[in-house]
Amino acid sequence: MHKVELELGGKTLTIETGRLAKQANGAVTVRYGDSMVLSTVCAQKEPRLGFDFFPLTVEYREKYYSAGKIPGGFFKREARPSEKEILSARLIDRPIRPLFPKDFKGETQCINFVISHDRENDTDVLALCGTACAIAISDVPIEKTVAGVRVGRLDGQLIINPTFEQLEECDIYVTMAGSADAIAMVEGGGREIPEDEMIEALQFGHDHIKLIVEKIDELKALCGKEKFVYTPVAIDEDLSNKVKEIVGGRLDEYNHVADKETRNESKSKLTEEIIEALAEEFPESDKDIKTVIHDLDSDSMRGMVVKEKKRIDGRQPDEIRDITCEIGFLPRAHGSAVFTRGQTQSLVAITLGTKIDEQRLDELEGESTKSYILHYNFPPFCTGEAKPMRGTSRREIGHGALAERALFPVIPNEEGFPYTLRIVSDIMESNGSSSMASVCGGSLALMDAGVPIKSAVAGIAMGLIKENDDIVILTDILGDEDHFGDMDFKVTGTSEGITAIQMDIKITGLEIETMRNALANANKARKHILGKMNDTISKHRDDLSTYAPRIITIKINPSKIGEVIGPGGKMIRSIVEETGAKIDINDDGIVLIASVDAEAGLKAKARVEEITYEPEVGNTFNGIVRRIVASGAIVELTKSSDGYMHISEMAHHRVNRVEDIVKLGDKVDVKVISVEPDGRIRLSRKALLPKPDKDNKE
């Protein structure tokens, strides 16, 4: 058994191997505080047949026992991965995938189990470090050692691996991964953060990543296995040369055609022509031929960008596609927008709901609710394809989470806007940057819905072509530029600063200076897009949609909550049935009344206020005598409150019998003269009567 330790962010990070999962190619346990993750890697030496890509699978699963919890549901066991688990798996996948040799196609699986959770330290970065370390010490081939950290900024101070509680207060929150000399992945955001401050946070994080990488390499030196010799995937050299000969300069010619459909049709015909021409000499080589053409196409496009500074759709490197914005497209949605950038288009709809519509989450950190949700959908027709529509894909979940995070800093808090807010982005067309179109469309739709967001938010996807020492940064990348390029760097924000960033690269790392230049270009592009959006709508509408619920908020005494609900919920159900409004009450006595019909909401409000009314000294009522006792009478003031009127408070003169003044069922004007600590109300009739003259009795 071997282990290494490192002081990080005021806690000890411990990485241990040799105790658990010893039959895996590599396995480590990572501990930080009382949170622990088991990370494993298993890989096959032989390539998986029928696959022309690297079959890497990354799994991240949170065991309920890790936090002393039992899963809900009928079977009481962990089921399919949650959204958090899927996002964490993607977070781990992105920085490690580029590190494997390009000709290695052996099936590889990385599995992470959260086996202890202290509800204070998040485990996704532990799993990232664990996966990187498990691969590093294993016999699975990999080119570099990487590690990951989370960076936060609290009260102006940058901190490493903030706790859940600290993260709530941070104005910068970034998860990142990298090697000793470069950054490989960034995922996070901030509350309108200037670019130079974000770069400072990334530099701070990278400095700490280097320390972890050093410890992983130390463990590798102690117990690392010799990397196995794998069977590389190679294409017959004669076949490759024949394909290159037939292609000649035709791909260069096609890549100078700006129209995507024409360009793709020409390439498809070329592929069919070559397959037919070589069918006799190289039978059953369709996949290999397509792979060679794909690589030649990549070289052509990349060379065109580097040498000519020209892109396949005719744009300059920093040029943005044409943008159109439309709002109010859907007549019945509470807000809607269509955002189009080139051949990428998003239809976004807003729905306003009530507290009842909140999403309820049961996570290891505890139970919580979520009142702001963004869902992203990528139907097959948006790329002109016919595919089966199954469940939500991991990609859709990831893109939705990015767009949700991008808009979050401008969403009003619950006190100022007590609605549950759902945003849905359906991609109508896609040729790159559909998640950024979702952000722009989401911002427009929020304003159309009358949601009082602080400012508009726009997003842009930056790309990179790196050939030796030549680096070209691309603005507003196409799908092909994402596919053939080296970077997909998405940046969102307002005119004031960044709200979200996400960087994925296909090379082993990116230097800080290149990221600085990419952020500067993204800032310029973002402001251009915001200008186009503001030309359509620059401020949220003053009124909500006529089809959206109106929410009235009132505060009642928490001791009165039971009276509003009634026995078995009888009272609150009767109010809902009578008025048609929805009512939600929290433990603090905050009552939310929602109704599309404003009059129904006011009627429900009046009923709640009537039930919870607490008379004060000096209030007057026209009450009804409900009970007579020897010493006085019980008078009903409202349907939920009554008071006691002593016989001495019925008249200025001496009263011998209560019935001489009031009878059961009589209406009587009374005044509240005192409210006892226990809530009992004392009333007076004579306080409202004129005092009689000395010679004239009442």
Image: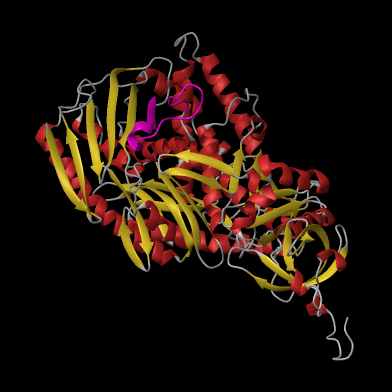
Q: Viewed as shown, does residue 9 lie left or right of 53? A: left
Q: Nearer the viewer, residue 344 or 419?
A: 419
In this figure, what is the number of numbered marks?
A: 0
Q: Can residue 343 be seen here?
A: no
Q: Residue furthest bottom?
A: 694
Q: Nearer the viewer, residue 540 or 492?
A: 540
Where residue 628 appears, x then y in whole percent?
A: 78, 59
Q: Is residue 553 visible?
A: yes
Q: Which residues are magenta?
A: 55-80
- Whether 497 is drawn above or below 188: the answer is below
Left or right: 673 as drawn, with respect to 82: right
In the depicted structure, whether residue 445 falls above or below residue 15 = below
Q: Nearer the viewer, residue 145 or 170?
A: 170
| Residue 479 drawn at (x, y percent) | 55, 40
Residue at the (55%, 51%) spot, across then down = 476
Position of the N terminus, as image quadrant, is: top left
Q: Quadrant of residue 172?
A: bottom left
Tell me which corner region of the image, top left, top right, bottom left or bottom right, holds residue 684: bottom right
Q: Residue at x 78, y 79 (%)?
A: 687
Please identify the quarter of the rendering in which residue 139 is found: top left
Is residue 163 in the magenta section? no
560 displayed left or right of 128? right
Q: In which quadrant is the C terminus drawn? A: bottom right
Image point 40% across, 61% down: which residue? 198
Task: List x then y, in percent, for residue 449.
Answer: 73, 55
